Image (cartoon, rainbow, N blue to C red):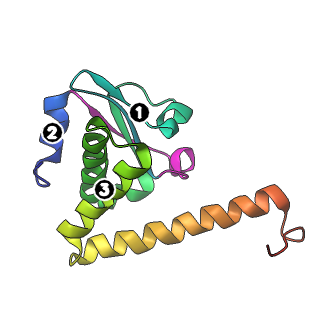
C-alpha cells in the first residue's frame, strides 16, 4: 500500500473516511466497518459505535494526523483479512507505522499527543466510576 495514495485506496475499495466528534470515538481514536474482498471486517468497537458499512471513522481531533492514522487503519484491516485477531492486527499495523515513520517528527508528535489523550481518558474514566476520594491503590 502506498502511504502517499491512501485516498486512492479508499476510492478503489468504495470506502468513505468520516471525521466524527472526539467525544464519540475518544476511547478508540479511529475505527472501521468495511467489506474487504467480500469479507466484513469490523472490530467490536465498530459494532459498539454503530459505524455504517464501508466507513472508517477518525476523531476530528486527529485530522492533522490523517495520513498516519488512515495508513494504520488500512494496514490493520489488511491484517484482519489475513486472519489475525483485532489485537494482533493492531500491533502489526503499529509495527508497520514505526518502521515507516520512526524518524518523522510529526508522526512522533502524534504518538505523544495521542498517548497523553488516552491516559487522560483512562484516568478520567476512573474518576467518573469511583470518584477521586474513593480510589485506593491496588
Q: What SS does tag 3 mark?
A: helix
Residue segment shown in magenta: 14-28
Q: What SS does tag 1 mark?
A: loop
Residue 15 at x, y percent in the picture: 25, 31
Residue 114 at x, y percent in the picture: 45, 66
Q: Earlier in the sequence, mark 1 or mark 2?
A: 2
Mark 2 crowd level (few <14, some 14–19, many ≥20, 10 Å Cα): some
**Numbered tag placed on residue 3 in the rendering:** none
Query: What's the distance in space between the residues labelled 1 and 3, CA to CA?
Result: 17 Å
Pick the front one: 13 or 97: 97
- Answer with left or right where residue 126 lies relative to residue 9: right
- The residue located at (23%, 60%) in the rendering is 96
Q: Is residue 51 above or below residue 67?
A: above
Residue 105 at x, y percent in the picture: 25, 78
Please tell me whether mark 1 or mark 2 is closer to you in this view. Answer: 1
Residue 110 at x, y percent in the picture: 36, 69
Where does label 1 land, which residue?
Answer: 42
- The residue located at (32%, 60%) in the rendering is 94
Quarter of the picture holding the C terminus: bottom right
Query: What's the distance in space between the residues labelled 2 and 3, CA to CA?
Result: 19 Å
Where does label 3 land, which residue?
Answer: 92
Where does label 2 land, which residue?
Answer: 9
- Answer with left or right where residue 12 lies relative to residue 50: left
Amino acid at each position: 500500500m502506498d502511504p502517499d495514495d491512501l485516498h486512492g485506496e479508499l476510492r478503489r475499495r468504495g470506502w468513505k473516511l468520516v471525521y466524527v466528534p472526539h467525544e464519540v470515538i475518544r476511547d478508540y481514536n479511529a475505527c472501521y466497518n468495511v467489506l474487504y474482498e467480500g469479507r466484513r471486517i469490523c472490530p467490536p468497537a465498530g459494532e459498539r459505535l454503530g459505524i455504517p458499512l464501508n466507513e472508517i471513522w477518525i476523531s476530528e481531533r486527529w485530522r492533522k494526523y490523517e495520513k498516519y492514522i488512515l495508513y494504520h487503519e488500512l494496514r490493520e484491516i489488511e491484517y484482519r483479512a489475513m486472519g489475525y485477531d483485532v489485537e494482533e492486527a493492531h500491533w502489526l499495523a503499529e509495527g508497520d507505522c514505526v518502521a515507516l515513520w520512526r524518524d518523522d517528527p510529526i508522526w512522533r508528535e502524534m504518538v505523544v499527543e495521542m498517548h497523553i489523550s488516552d491516559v487522560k481518558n483512562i484516568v478520567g474514566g476512573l474518576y467518573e466510576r469511583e470518584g477521586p476520594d474513593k480510589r485506593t491503590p491496588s
